[in-house]
Image (cartoon, grey):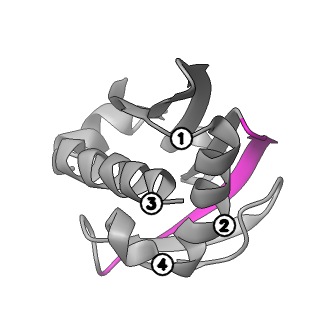
Amino acid sequence: MKAYEIETSIAAPTEVVWSVLTKDLPKSPEAYGILRFEGDVELNAKIKLWSEVAPDRAFALKVTTFEGPKTMVWRGGMPLGLFTGTRTFTLSPQNGGTRFKMQEVFSGLLSSMITKTMPDLTPSFTKFSQALKTKAEAQ
């Protein structure tokens, strides 16, 4: 099982960070390293995105958890659970601001084979969290 994770402190209340994450991201995805974003960020919604990491590939995902302003989960992958990517966003109050954590875990029978061919997602995660931080702190 392969995973990527990033944590950052944001000098904005969790409600503000949540609003930026769920409302601004779909409107201006480029700042987050996402070339295109389709759908609404809400519970059980189907969303589709194209990332800078793989610009020619659409990632079809489902919002499986939506508990504002603290946790959201996007999940997608292959049928029968052969390969699944689960991205979890966690917001926690911290010293008048927010501790933001984003983690993606890849699992399934084919995960070890598929993740070997994937690029390092660390730069993408860093860009995403920095865009969220910048936009939330500007509110």
Q: Eyeballing the image, is 52 above or below 124?
A: below
The magenta-colored residue range is 56-69
Q: In which quarter of the image is residue 127?
A: bottom left
Q: Quadrant of residue 51?
A: bottom left
Q: What residue type is labelled 4?
A: Ser
Task: Give the mark nearer the N terminus: 1 vs 2.
Answer: 1
Q: Which label sits in the foreground, 3 or 2?
A: 3
Q: Name the residue under label 3.
A: 135
Q: Mark 1 points at which residue?
A: 12
Q: Which amino acid does label 1 sit on?
A: Ala
Residue 23 numbered mark, or none:
2
Q: Which amino acid does label 2 sit on?
A: Lys
Q: What element carries label 1?
A: loop
- Residue 137 relative to residue 71: left or right: left
Q: Which label sits in the foreground, 1 or 4?
A: 1
Look at the image and tell me whether residue 53 can be seen. yes
Q: Eyeballing the image, is 24 above or below 107?
A: below
Circles 1 and 4 in contact, beta carbons < 8 Å:
no
Q: Eyeballing the image, is 86 above or below 79?
A: above
Q: What element carries label 3?
A: helix
The residue at 54%/59% (across/down) is: 139
